[in-house]
Amino acid sequence: MCPGHPERSTRGAARACHWFVLLGLLIGLAYTGVYRVGRRQFGEVRSLPLRPAVAVWLLDGGLLASLFYFGAARTIARIIDPAPSADAAVGDRPARYPLEILIIVVLVVLKLMLLVAIPQGVSSWPGPGDWRSHFNWMYPRSPYRPLILAPMWGRWAMLLVGSIGQVRDQGDTGLSRFCGSLSAALVLLWMVPVALLTAIYCGRQGRWMFGCIVSCIVLAGTFLYGVIAARRQGGQTRASIAGAGLMGELIFLIAYEAFATNIYAS
């Protein structure tokens, strides 16, 4: 940011918003690569892709999304207990620290369970004569599709939550400029490609509606998280926006796997 040039800083924040979903795509491709190598090297354990899922989980929690877990844990702790304890020594952290640790453990285990449960459905591609067959190179195998989509939804969720409510700490100029550069039009603009890709990847045998339903569930769940976080803690914080990245991924994976039987039904 440029403290001496607020207009330039605001424009920079607006440009940065346009990279969130694309960054999610790159992270999804990295997850896919790790998952694929894991399947080839270690295979499956009793028909479960346990080792590939653990490899992705370690990359996610240990490097690429570690801040998401801490942000989600702190935000959920504030939602559960919005008022600091009277005997808290410094702020509200000492009073909530055990609760945050518990929430992190729950989120970490939940993410691992969802990664292990990724459906290994029959992969399909448009056949010869279908105009979509020219884009078959864009259709990964079935287990890789949610790995690509989840980080995209997670980064988009950060944009959505950043546009809800006000910033709690008005002295945080960086966060204020980021949230101030967001608008409903920009959030919906970036939802279109992610929702379209979700519909395509869930559209085996013409089942496009399941991808649309999954997209609506992510939208509703993330919006609800953003509204509750803003109300319970007096506005958005860096923690709540970072936590939105994890919440968006979890909501997507839960919804995707809930409809997996319908998506991959023959």
Image (cartoon, grey):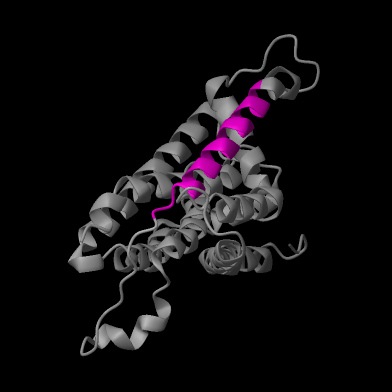
**Viewer-nearest residue: 227 or 99:** 99
Rendered position, 42 above or below 239: below
Rendered position, 16 above or below 68: below
- Residue 192 placement: quadrant: bottom left
Q: Which residue shows up at 45% across the image and 51% down it?
A: 47
Q: Which residue shows up at 68% across the image and 47% down it?
A: 66
The residue sitting at the front extreme is 46
| Residue 203 among those drawn in magenta | no
Is 252 left, or right, of 207 in this rendering? right
| SS assignment for the magenta stretch, majority | helix
| Residue 110 among those drawn in magenta | yes
Q: Quadrant of the C terminus?
A: bottom left
**Viewer-nearest residue: 235 or 40:** 40
Residue 155 drawn at (x, y percent): 53, 57
Q: Would residue 24 be seen by someone viewing this image from the given angle?
A: yes
Residue 27 drawn at (x, y percent): 58, 64
Q: Quadrant of the N terminus?
A: bottom right
Q: Would residue 237 be seen by someone viewing this image from the given angle?
A: no
Magenta segment:
99-119
Q: Which residue shows up at 41% across the image and 78% down it?
A: 138
Residue 76 drawn at (x, y percent): 56, 30
Rendered position, 12 above or below 131: above
- Residue 89 placement: quadrant: top right
